[in-house]
Amino acid sequence: MTSIEENRQTALRKLFGARNLPFPHGVTSVCSAHPLVIEAAVRRAGMEHRAVLIEATCNQVNQEGGYTAMTPVDFRRFIEDIAAATDFPAERIILGGDHLGPNPWRKLAAEEAMLRAAAMVTAYVEAGFEKIHLDTSMGCAGEPTAIDDELTAARAARLAKAAEEAALRSGRRPPVYIIGTEVPPPGGATHALEEIEITRADAAMKTLAVHRASFAEAGLASAMERVIGIVVQPGVEFGNTDVALYKPERAKSLIRSLDDMPGLVFEAHSTDYQPAEALSALVDGGFAILKVGPGLTFALREALYGLDVIADVLAGRTPRAGLVTTMEKIMVEQPASWTGHYGGSPDEERLQRHFSYSDRIRYYWPDPRASAAVGELFSRLPDEIPETLISQYLGRLYSDVVSKRVAPKARELCLAAVDAVLAPYSAATAIR
C-alpha cells in the first residue's frame, strides 16, 4: 500500500467515524443549499449505499442567517427533512462547514470579525457539523487581502479552540478539521484564468508546520490529530467564462509532499466543470476530498431554462422566457451577490448574470419570487414532456429519457441534470 493510499484511508476513517459503510476511495463534498441539489445528492448516495457529505459555506449559513436565512441548526433540519422524504438514513449524512472564518465580516476590524467567526464555528459544532474547514487566510479591515501563514494559523487555532469547547459543552463528537493558507476563493475566481499557480510542496509543508505550532501553543494537540486535510491549489479553477483543467504532471511535486504528511490528504476546491478523467486523477493523486457547488446549480439552471422554453413551445407561442425574465428582474433589483464578480459592458454583465460558470444566480433561487416562478413553470408543463422537445432543449438528458432511466417529468429532469454532474464524482471516489 502506498503512503498516499495509507493517508487516504486514515483521513477518511476519521471523517466517516463509526459509520459501517463500504470504504470509498475518496469523497464528494456537495456545497449547496438548493433543495433539488440536496435531493439529487441524497438519492445518489442512497442508490450507492454510501454516506453523503454536504457542506454549508460561511456566507450561506451562519449564526446570523447568511444569504439562505438559515442558521446551522436550520440547515441541519433542512437537510434531514429532505433525507427523510427520500428514506435516506440521517446517520449516513455528514455535515461540514466550509470556509469558516471571518470572511462574512472581513470589512470589520479583525477582533470583531474573529469574535463573530468564533460564534459561527460554535454554532456549527453545536448543531452537529462534523467536518470544519477553518479558513482564516483573508485579511480584515486595514489588513492585507491575504495575511501571512503564521497569523492565519494562529487565528485557525483560535477558532479550533472554540469548536473544541463547543463539542465538549454539547456532548458532540469532536469535529475533524481542514486547514490551509493558500485557499482558492469561495465560488470561483473573478478574473480571466491564465496559468494557475500550483501550491509549492514546501508551502504545503509550511502550512502544516505553522498550524501544528499554533495548535500546540493553544493546547490543542488532540485537535491537531483530527486535522485530516489541507486545502491547496492543484491547478484547478473556474472563472466566469473559462475553466482551468487539472494537469497531473504539474502537481507531481505537491503530490509527493503527502509522503511527509502522515494521515493527511489534500482537499481540492473549485473542481466544478472538470472532466471525469481529471476528477479520477485528482483522487488518485491524494486529493481525496472533491468539493463541488456552482457546477451543480449551473446544471439545474440549464434544466429550468430549457423547461421554460419547452413550456412556451407546448403552449404554441414564441418562447418568452418567463423564468429568465423573473430572475433578471430579481438580480438587477438586488445586485449585491453578483456586482463585483461580473464586469464588462451591460450586455456582458447580463450574460454573466445567467450563464456564468461562477453561477452567482444560485444566490437568488431562495427568493420567494424565484420559488414562485419555478412553481408556476412546473404548473405550465404536462405530466409527461415529449421526448422530441427534451432532445431539442435538454439534450444532455435525452439518452437517459429514451432509455427509461429518467422519467420525462419536469422535476425528475431537474434532478437528473444535477445527478449527471454528480455521476463522475461518484466514479472518481468509488471503491477501487
Image: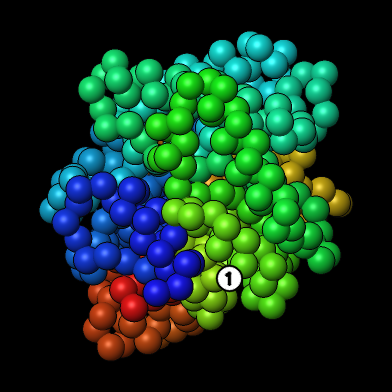
Q: Position of residue 181 (x, y in %)?
A: 67, 41
Q: Is residue 7 left or right of residue 248?
A: left
User: Toward the viewer: 219 or 278?
Assistant: 219
Q: Is residue 223 left or right of residue 237?
A: left
Quadrant of the frame with the C terminus: bottom left
Q: Residue at x 69, y 68 (%)?
A: 253
Q: Is 107 located above or below residue 229 in the figure?
A: above
Res 63 seen here? no
Quick one: SS at disc 1? loop
Residue placed farthest to the right in the image? 345
User: Toward the viewer: 164 or 123?
Assistant: 164
Q: Position of residue 296 (x, y in %)?
A: 48, 59
Amino acid at circle 1: Gln
Quadrant of the frame with the N terminus: bottom left
Q: Where does label 1 land, which residue?
A: 274
User: Toward the viewer: 272 or 208?
Assistant: 208
Q: Position of residue 76 (x, y in %)?
A: 30, 35
Q: Is 265 located above or below residue 77 in the figure?
A: below
Q: Position of residue 374 (x, y in %)?
A: 41, 50
